[in-house]
Image (cartoon, rainbow, N blue to C red):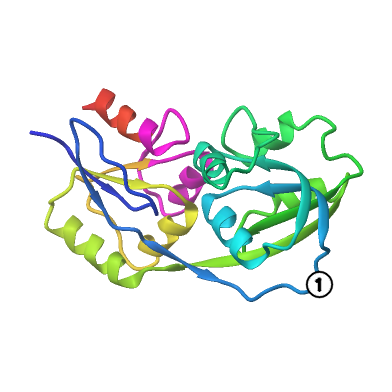
Amino acid sequence: MKPVVLNTGSRNETYKGLTVLHKPLIKICALPLDETIRAQYDWLIFTSKNAVTLFFEIYPYIKYKQVAAIGTKTEEALSNLNIKVDYVPSRFQQEYFLEDMDTRFQDKTVCLPISKKARPLMFETLKNIATVDKIELYEPQPHLDNVMCVHQMIRSRTIDWILFLSPSSVHAYFQHFSLSEDIRVMAIGQVTSEALQKYNVSHVISEQETLYAMYETIKKLN
C-alpha cells in the first residue's frame, strides 16, 4: 500500500508511489503599500515565491538593475515573469546566500521584500555592507479550518507522514494540538526542524530543501 503523505505547505505536487494529500496550514495576508521606499535599486533580493508575486503586483513601478533569489520555486516564479535572476546561492537557506554572496552587494542599494515574520538574519547582515530597504509585503496567518481538518485526519490515523515546510506551519498546528506518535514527521530544512524541536516533536529532515526531495526521502525510508 502506498504511504499516505500530508503536505501542509502552500504548493501541491504529486509523487509517483505516494498518496499525497494537501492541506495548507498558512494563508498569506498582503500588507499595505509602503510609501517610504525609494524608486530604484541596484538589487532586488527575493526569499520566497510569495514575495515575488506580491512585490510585482504592489510595486510594479520600482526599477532595479539585478535580481537575487533563494530557492528553485522563487527562481521559477521570477522566470515566469521573464525576469533574469543574477544570483542564486548553492543551497536554499539565508545562511548559504550570505556565505556565497562575496562582494555582490557591497555599497549597493538593496530592496528586500519579505514576510513580516521573516528571520532577521538577511537584513541584519546586509545592512552592514549595503543600503537596505526592507519591505514587509505580507503576514502569514494560521489557516484555522485546515488546522482543525489536519488534526481530525491525524486522530483518525488516515495519514502516515506529515510534512512541514516552514516554521509558521509548525506553529500553526502545535500551538493548538499535539501529534500522535505513530505519525511520522518531516521538516524541509534546518530552520523548520528547529521549530519542531521547540515542541519536542520527533522528526526527520529532508535531504534537500525542496518538496520533491521530501518525497524522495520518504521513498527511501519506507
Left or right relative to 82: residue 45:
right
How many other residues sit within 10 Å of disc 1, few (<14), some (14-19) or many (≥20)? Answer: few
Look at mark 1 in the image and give the residue it sits on.
36
| Residue in the picture at 57% in, 66% down | 138
In the image, residue 108 above or below residue 120 = above
Residue that sits furthest to the right in the current view: 107
Q: Secondary structure at mark 1?
A: loop
Residue 52 percent coordinates (x, y): 58, 53
- Residue interval drawn in magenta: 187-213
| Residue in the picture at 35% in, 68% down | 176
| Residue in the picture at 19% in, 45% down | 182
Residue 206 percent coordinates (x, y): 41, 33
In the image, residue 20 above or below residue 26 = above
Please state which of residues 187 and 109 is positioned toward the viewer in this rendering.
109
What amino acid is at disc 1?
Thr
Residue 127 percent coordinates (x, y): 84, 51
Could you say which quadrant of the image residue 93 lies in? top right
Left or right relative to 176: residue 181:
left
Residue that sits furthest to the front in the current view: 82
Residue 194 percent coordinates (x, y): 50, 46
